[in-house]
Amino acid sequence: MKSSNLLSRGILIGAIMALSIWFFYPLDKKIKLGLDLQGGMHLVLQVQTDDALRADSDSDMQRLTTDAKEKGLTLAPVRLSPTSFQFSGLNPENKDALGQLVRANLPFWDSAERGDTVVLSIKPAEATKIRELAVTQAVQTIRNRIDEFGVAEPVITPASGYRVVVQLPGVDDPERIRRLIKNVAFLEFRLVRGGPAPTAEALGQVAPNLEVMPGDIRDDVTGAVTGKQYYLVEKVRVITGRDLKVAHPGQGKLGEPVVNFSLTAQGSKLFGDATGANIGTGLAIILDGKVVSAPRINARITDSGVIEGGFTQQEVEDLTTTLRSGSLPAGLTYLEERTVGPSLGRESIRSGVRAGVIGTGMVVLVLLLYYHLAGVNAVSALMLNILILFGGLGMFGSTLTLPGIAGVILTIGMAVDANVLVFERIREELRAGRTVRSAIDLGFERAFTSIIDTHVTTLVSALFLFQFGTGPVRGFAVTLIIGLLASIFTAVYVSHWIFDLVLHNRRVEKLSI
């Protein structure tokens, strides 16, 4: 073995060691801990995508009725479902005019005639697109709110079934976070057609285009909720929270905390048209399915307004945060909520580290007892394997979880397995009468195929876990992938180099293996 070749290989190994140390040291700053190790919150939220469909369809219907009015056609849409509306009492002329408007302005809607009735429905592909977009917007909105709160390294990802998974490591005020996310801030403005009434039944028969919405009765002095009242409001929304441009805390006429808001250009036009045509009518401000206030429209309102509701200052600040970071396109339902305390996380770290140390110690002991001095070679390669593994975690910014620690321990087993394959091959060659140098070279050469086979099959499994798994499963997959790649390098390249270094310029008749 030439000295220059030995030196270049040693430099490469040293460089990888140095880079690994650079990427993971200090551990507490370079390696992020997962929810199960650091403590925090785990939430699974269901996005109520029907809300997004209703908001989009309301906007389309409002635009359709406005365009129809400009052409002298008065339409009264009645909602049948989140994706369909019905227009009744149309003569053939009006049906033709409506059909032309739909084709010109609503390309994603289908129409069907049933006598003097026309039913408009959103096309299924468009409905699916709106639902998926609602989930994407919900993810972004929740992330904006969490970022404003200052949670480090949150994990907020969409999941199947129009769900969102939220993991917040290191949260020290879970109740505040819970309120911040729970305050969905799905804001709607609807015209009032009846109420307030002490009970829903007192509002009488409800027309198809109306629905009953609850609201709280609050004490004028303390702001405490003292009862319930009910309003009859139109199903079609005037505007929603998506039409807001700016929201900030303010004070009402009596100094009470309120939320001041301004609207986008499109929202201003819609709001101005609706309020201008309904002066003297109540306007319900509905937040998360509850009427917070229903002021009387005294004049046309365009680009700004006030949300009042007997809020405390803290409630106003939280509501402003949620509105400013973006109103959710749809409501959310909590399907799962887990809180991991910091003490439990620390105990998980202690248990994981203890298991890793004990496991590694036993492996080292067996290697040294069974393979003698050659076991020192395997132990050295194993230590470098762990070093590279943590360096890889630091380099890729991966999060270490409890299953990730299990991946580290499994990696140790895979690395030792590779060394065992090589050493047993070397023993076979020595028993066959080969020289030490020849036995080592042939041992590595003939074990290489088996090592690649075992590692590649496990690597493929780990890649599938990473692709289709979530949370801790992906953490396990990441550590396993990095560890397997490191294992191939250390068991084949580094271990062979150590043997070459020891045997360089020396004639050895017997190998301690």
Image (cartoon, rainbow, N blue to C red):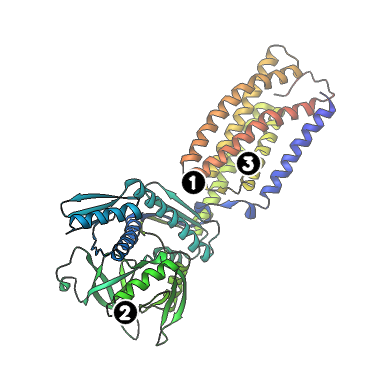
Q: Earlier in the sequence, mark 2 or mark 3?
A: 2
Q: Earlier in the sequence, mark 1 or mark 2?
A: 2
Q: CA distance from mark 2 to mark 3?
A: 66 Å
Where is mark 1, residue-wise?
472
Query: Which percent across, then down, holds residue 315?
Result: 42, 74
Q: CA distance from mark 3 to mark 1?
A: 17 Å
Query: Which percent across, then down, holds residue 33?
Result: 56, 52
Q: Earlier in the sequence, mark 3 or mark 1?
A: 3
Q: Which mark is residue 389?
A: 3
Let me know if residue 179 appears in the view.
no
Q: Which mark is residue 297?
A: 2
Amino acid type, callout 2: Ile
Query: Which percent across, then down, holds residue 405?
Result: 55, 44
Q: Quadrant of residue 513?
A: top right
Which residue lies at the image location 19% right of the left edge and 73% below the top edge?
199
Amino acid type, callout 3: Leu
Which residue lies at the image location 40% right of the left edge and 87% below the top edge?
253
Q: Residues within 10 Å of mark 3 (few under 14, many from 20)?
A: many
Amino acid type, callout 1: Pro
